[in-house]
Amino acid sequence: MKPKRPALPSPAASLTASATVAALLLSLTGCGGDASADGDGSTVTVTVGYQSRTINTVTAGTLLRSLGYFEKQLNALGDGVTYKVDWQDFATGAPITAQMTAGKIDIGSMGDFPLLINAARGKQLGKPTRMVSVTGYNLRGGLNTIVTAPGSSLTSLKDLKGRKVSTSVGSAADGTLVRALQRAGLDPYEDVEKLNQQPAVGASALSSGSADALSQFVAWPGLLAQQGKAKALYDGAQLNLATFHGVAAREDFTKKRPAVLQAFLKAQTQATDYLDAHPVAAAESVAKATGLPAETVYLYNGAQGIATFDPAIKPQLVAALKEDVSILKDAKLTGDVDVDAFVDDRYVKKALGTEAYAERLAATPPDPAGEVWPKGAEKTLPFTSPTALLKHVAAHRGSVRAAYVPDTTTGTLWFADRSVWVADGTRLLPFVTPETARAYVAGHGGARVVTYADALERAS
C-alpha cells in the first residue's frame, strides 16, 4: 500500500499560525522596529539572525561575527550614533522568519526555499522583507545531498519507493528530494513516506534505522559521510539547478536605516574576501565556533569547495528562485511569491559600487579541482587530476588531513576516501554516488568500479 500524501497546512492555516506566532512574539518582547533604539536615539541595537551550522551563510553570520567587520563598519559611519549588534543563532531559517515578521530581527540569512517562505510570510503579515544579497551558492545544486546508512542496500532513487525519507519540509533539501524523485519517476508524496525532521533528528533517525534515507542541506551530508555514518545516494548537482543561501532584511528597517544595511553588506563583502584569501583559516575559525570538523567545513567552503561565495545577486540564482516557488506551492507552504519584488540588489550594488558589482555578476566559479590538506598545513595542495592526487595521498598516507576530489560528471567536491572510484584504462575517476559511477561505466567500455584502496594502489 502506498504511503498517504501528508496532510499539509493550507495557505490560510499557515497564515493563521504565522500570525499567531508573530503576535505572541510581539506580546512577549514589546514593540518591534525602532524599539531597538534608546530613548534619545543615541544608541541603536541591530539584531542579526544567523545559522552558525548552516555554513554557507558564514559570511553573513559565523565568520562575519568572529571577524568583527560589521561592528567596525558601523563605528565608521560617524553619524553620532552608538551601535550595538545582537547576534542571534538559530538551527534553521523558520524561527528567523518568525522573528523578522515580529519586528525583532532586522537582518537574517537562510537558504533559498526559506527565503521564499520569508517573502510570503512577510507579505501575508504586512511585514514585508527583501532579499538583499547572496552568501554561498552552487549553480548546479550541489549544496544538497540525499544520503543513506553506510550498510544500506539502496543504490538509486528508485530504491526509495515505499521507504521512509527524513528531510526538513520547506527547506532547499526538501526541494531537492521532491525534484529528484519526480525525475526518477516517483511521486514525492505518494511513493515515499516523508519524515519532517530537523537535520540533527534526521541524522539520528538514519543511524537508528527509523529512516531509510536523509535529504539535507550543508553541512549535514558531508559531516555524516566524513564520520562514516552515511554514504551519498544522490548528488543535488544532478538536477543542474542553482541553489544558494542569502540575506533578507525587513523592508521598514532598510528604508529607515539604509546606511546600516550598507554597512552590513560592506562587512559581508569583507568577510567574503577574507574567506577567499584565507580558506583554511576561515574553515578553522568556523569549526571552532560551531563544533563542526574543519575538514567538513572546508569541503563546502574551501578554495575548491562545493559553494562559491559572492554577495552579488546573479540572474541565474533569481531564475532558480522563481522555479522553486512551484515546489512550495505544491506542498501548500506558500501561495504565489513575487520574486522580482522580493529581490532587491540596490543596497548591495551601492555598497560595492556599480563597477565592482558588475564584475562580481560576471564572475564565474573556479573550475573543479582536487585538493589535499596536509596535517599541520595552513594551505592545501591543488591537483589537476584525480590520479595525481591519489598518487600524492598514497605517498603521504600518514600526513594527509583530508583529500577532496570533484565528481567527474557534476563537479561536486567530495572526500576522496568516501567517493566511488572508477578505473577507465589508466585514468582513475571519482564520483559522489554509485548511480553516477554506474552511468559512466555503462557508457565506457572497459571501465569498472574499484575500491578506494585499489585506486590508491593503481595510482602509486
Image (cartoon, rainbow, N blue to C red):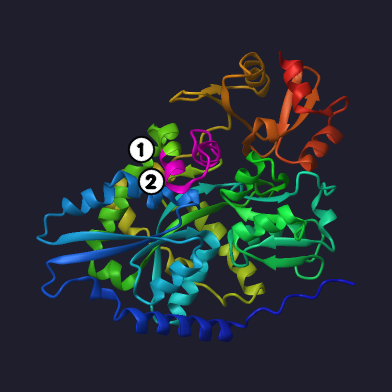
Mark 2: few/some/many CA within 10 Å (<14, 14-19, 20+): many
> Residue at left 84%, top 54%?
159
Give yes or no for residue 407 being in the magenta stretch. Answer: no
Label 1: few (<14), some (14–19) or many (≥20) C-alpha neighbours in 10 Å: some
Position of 244 compared to 41: left or right?
right
The residue to which callout 1 is attached is: 274
Instruction: Evaluate if marks 1 and 2 touch, with contact meaning CB atoms under 8 Å apart.
Output: yes
Amino acid under disc 2: Leu
The residue lying at 61 percent from left, 70 percent from top is: 328
Side of 285 where 79 appears, left or right? left
424 relative position to 92: left or right: right
Q: Position of residue 257 (x, y in %)?
A: 23, 66
Secondary structure mostly taken by the magenta-highlighted segment of the chain: helix
Rendered location of residue 241, percent (x, y): 62, 52
User: SS for tag 2?
Assistant: helix
* Mark closest to the chain's N terminus, 1 or 2: 2
**Span of residues in magenta:** 285-305
Check the image and report above or below for 120 versus 61: below
Residue 122 visible to an observer of this rendering: yes
Secondary structure of the residue carrying numbered label 1: helix
Residue 260 located left or right of residue 18: left
- Residue 64: horizontal and vertical position, in percent? 35, 48
Q: Is residue 365 above or below residue 156?
A: above
Q: Residue at x 82, y 60 (%)?
A: 185
Residue ID at (55%, 32%):
367
Amino acid of disc 1 = Tyr
Q: Count every numbered label the image shows and give the total.
A: 2
**In front: 381, or 395?**
395
Q: Which residue is mark 2?
A: 63
Q: Quadrant of the N terminus?
A: bottom right
